[in-house]
Image (tube, rainbow, N blue to C red):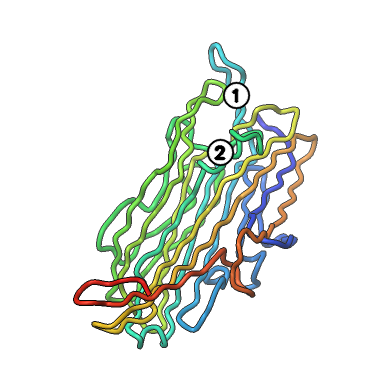
Amino acid sequence: MWIHATWVIGNTHWGQILEPSIRKYLLTNLYVFVWTAPTFVSLPILGIPAYADGNGTFYWDTCLAVGNVVNVEWLMGHNLVYWVPPVGVIGYENYLEDSTMYYNNGFVVSQLGAIDYYYGYEQYSAGITNTLIGNQGGAGVWGPAPMSGVNQYGVFLLGVVSVIPFIGVNMTLPPGATEDIGNLLSPTETISFNGWTVEVANITWTFNIDYGSNQKMFANAFENLLANLFIPSLTSVSDAEFNVHFDNYVITLYRPYEYFTTETIWVNTTWMTIFIPQSSTVVSIPMYHQQSSTPPSNSYVSGVSSSRYYLLYGLYGYG
């Protein structure tokens, strides 16, 4: 069943509204595709250049594809269920290590990425939004899968469903570097939406690298496919939210038998989708840049923290 609607899709991260141009999203009869980086920067080759401090530069990006069709189904003993299939999400992060950090024996320890539908479920439960996005019956597809000792892999938002466009991202670490990739669903909840079983999870990936390379990029990406936006009614507006998180942890300086310093950069963003039934199809996609903490000036991150640890007889303490 086809339903014409206005889509309002945005990415919330700090304070100003930036209007996108036509090249920043695609609209067809089958899907709406939104790409964050071009809204903030004109050349999103490496993502948004979010933070630089002499040790390195951190980049991040995320994109969202939403089907432009509504499915309708009746479950015995329950109300009609409307849902938009599918919702596909990609997150991308990249750290470029500078020479100063490299020659101070610094290296990239780990990165973290998360697609957090559980946050959207909390917003829905609190009455802040009137619907949610989740994986029907726990049938979501996400990647990369857990693996060890890898130097490269691919993340592709495509092909499992015809309405989603092909978007391919190949990740390759610097020569000599490998990483261990872990995946965890926590917290997670299985709920009933008008009789349908829906899993709402915080899907978290960890990328353990422990490697340094002069003027080289350490990039990782993650995705979730086949999530659905569940719609309570075709006569009123439906709104849902979910988060995408990024985290980069490095040792910026290491003095054997003396001390080492660490730095953590993190980014919290929120995707907002608003479904407005109407007689014609129009798309409006504002991007919101919303300050949620006190990030460094002239940056696109939520926060940065640094610590020094002193090495004492094989042990270390806080400094």
Q: Which mark is residue 20?
A: none
**Which residue extends farthest top?**
77
Residue 141, position as x, y percentages in the image: 42, 43
Work out whether residue 13 or residue 139 is closer to the camera in this orientation and state it: 13
- How many other residues sit within 10 Å of disc 1, few (<14), some (14-19) or many (≥20)? some
Residue 232, position as x, y percentages in the image: 65, 28
Tags 2 and 1 touching, CB below 8 Å: no
Secondary structure of residue under mark 1: strand
How far apart are the two marked residues, 2 and 1, measured between alpha carbons?
Answer: 21 Å
Say which residue label 1 marks.
81
Q: Nearer the viewer, mark 2 or mark 1?
A: 2
Residue 166, position as x, y percentages in the image: 51, 53
Say which residue label 2 marks.
122
Placement of the C terminus among the 4 image quadrants: bottom left
Q: Which residue sits at x=63%, y=74%?
A: 297
Work out whether residue 285 or residue 166 is closer to the camera in this orientation and state it: 285
Res 173 visible: yes
Amino acid found under the numbered disc labelled 1? Val
Amino acid found under the numbered disc labelled 2? Glu
Residue 15, position as x, y percentages in the image: 70, 61
Q: Which residue sits at x=67%, y=39%?
A: 239
Q: Quadrant of residue 308?
A: bottom left
Placement of the N terminus among the 4 image quadrants: top right
User: N-terminal of the two: label 2 or label 1?
Assistant: 1
- How many other residues sit within 10 Å of disc 2, few (<14), some (14-19) or many (≥20)? some
Res 21 visible: no
Q: In the image, is 165 to the left or to the right of 29? A: left
Q: In the image, is 183 to the left or to the right of 81? A: left
Work out whether residue 177 or residue 251 is closer to the camera in this orientation and state it: 251
Q: In the image, is 21 to the left or to the right of 119? A: right
Secondary structure of residue under mark 2: helix
